[in-house]
Amino acid sequence: MGERERVFSGARPTGRQHLGNYLGAIQNYVALQDHYDCVYCAVDLHALTTMEDTERLRENTAEMVLDWLAAGIRPEESIVFVQSHVPELPLLHTILSMVTPLGKLTDLPTFKEKVRLQPHNVNYGLVGYPVLMTADIVLYKARYVPVGLDQAPHLEFAREVVRTFNHRVGREVLIEPEMKVTEVPKVLGTDGQQKMSKSLDNHIELAATPEETLKKVMTMVTDPARIRRSDPGNPDVCNVFSMHKIFSSGDDVGMVNVECRRAGIGCVECKQLFARNLNRHLEPFRRRRGEFEQTPNVVWDVLSDGAKRAREIAAATMADVRDAVGLP
Ligand code: SF4
């Protein structure tokens, strides 16, 4: 893997990925491979903190990783693995939890938000979530973590834990990770209001068929002031137009921008055009996904090899940590 600096990122195994995941993370994962040594993890343990029904966890992991591979993540270069396949992680989590004040964890806005969302399931793991996240990053000696600006406080927390740990043991055992801020467009769901998300069912799956995609696109909310076909629209407040800007050619974007404003194009036609362009964009992804699906066990082979490589790094880190802490 050479001299390249390492990047770590984890994603909850949420099953088939959607456009929001693609634009917000996966595209960036793929691009980072050209410059960094990348470690990408399906964080199944994190999923357990908020999940009560784990029946589909295995399948959701496989579907997500299949999407990663189809999108261009190269497992022969990058390490792609499942969080719980590395048994060194819970040990590091426990050790780091000893240097983390409880009050800091319960004061975090993200913890308070989780308590609000699931008051019936405020479990111990939920409180320690940021410590587990810190362990994820530092176990693999990652220098950078790609994050959106909204996640900056999480990484700042991880940096603090690392500083405290290194200070306690009196040497730089763990690497203090840095943010790799990535500009990602805010991807709204088909409702045009909220962030695209599977749980809100306002998402468009990458692996959907062209017909399914068209159907979803047709449900997209447009400029709310444009009621009749003859009303001029305002693309600046329309989510379909925002998506055109990402997936359509400059000519199509220019045409919609002009014609919408003078009612020269109707929303149905405009959405059909967008669905066509989106399907064209996703065609190579879908073809590759189909090819991977033909190879039995491809995802689990990738994950098993990834876990092996991840464990090698983890073992080296833990040898240093055990020694620094003085564990017998
Ligand atoms: S024509 Fe297109 S850009 Fe204009 S409001 Fe309808 S869907 Fe939106």
Image (cartoon, rainbow, N blue to C red):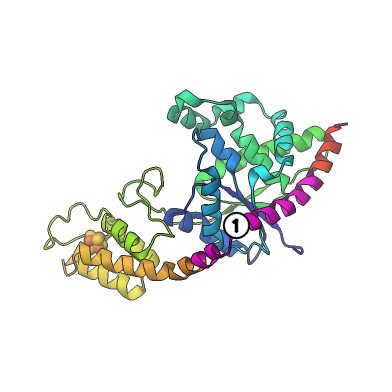
In the image, 62 versus 88, the foreground residue is: 62
Residue behind label 1 places its C-beta within 8 angstroms of ligand 1: no
Q: Position of residue 241 (x, y in %)?
A: 30, 62
Which quarter of the rendered image does ligand 1 occupy?
Answer: bottom left
Specify few, some or many for label 1: CA neighbours under 10 Å numbering under 14, 14-19, or 20 or more.
Answer: many
Please tell me which residue is depicted at 32% across the width and 63% down the height of the picture. Answer: 211
* Residue 312: in magenta span: yes
Location of the N terminus (image quadrant) = bottom right
Q: Which residues are magenta?
A: 289-317
| For residue 42, above or below residue 91 | below
Residue 6 appears in the figure:
yes
In the image, 15 versus 140, the foreground residue is: 15
Kind of residue at badge 1: Val
Please tell me which residue is depicted at 49% across the width and 35% down the height of the picture. Answer: 53
Residue 176 appears in the figure:
no
Q: Which of the 4 image quadrants contains residue 259?
A: bottom left
Q: Is residue 179 left or right of residue 242?
A: right
Q: Residue tagged by mark 1?
A: 299
